[in-house]
Amino acid sequence: MKTKAIFNWSGGKDSTLALYDVRQEEKFDIVSLMTTISSGAQRITMHGVRRELLLEQCKSIGLPVREVELPEQPSMKAYDEIMLKEMKAFAEKGVTHSIFGDIFLEDLRAYREEKLKEAGLKGCFPLWRKDTDKLVREFINLGFKAIVVCVNAGLLDREHVGRPLDRDFLTNLPKDVDPCGENGEFHTFVYDGPIFSAPVSFKTGERVTKEYPAPTNDTSSSVSESVKPVGFHFCDLFLA
């Protein structure tokens, strides 16, 4: 029997490539994807992607999704309490592992493993310590298609959002920006590729800039995927 696991799903490139790798290995029985949603805006937290696009994405992938609603700008205590409750509920159903698309943020992995231990689960990190430039190019070469939906305004300008994640995008990235955006420089929405039964049809909307309060500590910064207390440029997406 395969090991039961849940998959922490952001809808972006790292999650997608990690899910692809896990499916290739056929070690885990993924009982559900899990995504945090902003309760007020009904969008994927940090990425800003609308809930209806998430649902279409998961439908095409062929996996159920557990939507965990979070209040706007939750405290770390509130976040931890909500997630612990969700993890324990999965553990009671026989789930033993939680899978993430993290690549090299040591403090974030340590935080995740500590919290998972409280719920009786173990972490799995398929992309851990892999070269980020090779990973993103593998993502493209496999035929995955993604659009950039959010960028850190302190590192990338407004013109970077709404662009496809392709070789041209990578070529134009500043040298201090990680090719996978692992430090929170940019986020994506994946709409087609080998794990999709059909492309997710969408159209782009307006570009907006928003500012968020500075995180109170390093752990909070890691969880929210923010790098600095600066603004973020977003490109809105709609179902076609």
Image: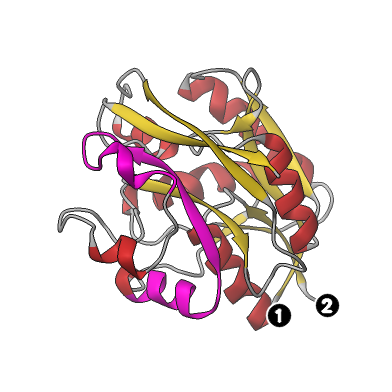
Give the alpha-carbon distance from disc 1 to disc 2, as whole Å: 11 Å
Q: Give the range drawn in magenta.
A: 134-162
Determine which residue is flagged by label 2. 1
The type of residue carrying mark 1 is Glu
The quadrant of the picture occupied by the C terminus is top right
**Image quadrant assignment for residue 3:** bottom right
Residue 237: x percent and y percent? Answer: 58, 39
Compared to 179, does 49 lie above or below?
above
* Left or right: 148 as drawn, with respect to 93: left
Residue 130: quarter of image: bottom left
- Taking the spot 53% from the left edge, 53% from the top edge, the residue there is 12
Q: How crowded is mark 2: few (under 14 residues within 10 Å), some or many (20 or more)?
A: few
Residue 121 lies in the magenta-colored region: no
Residue topped by disc 1: 26
Dot 1, crowdedness within 10 Å: few (<14), some or many (≥20)?
few
Q: Which of 188 and 198 is in front in this view?
A: 198
Q: Where residue 53 appears, x then y in whole percent?
A: 69, 43
The tag earlier along the polypeptide, 1 or 2, is: 2
Q: Is 10 above or below relative to 213?
A: below
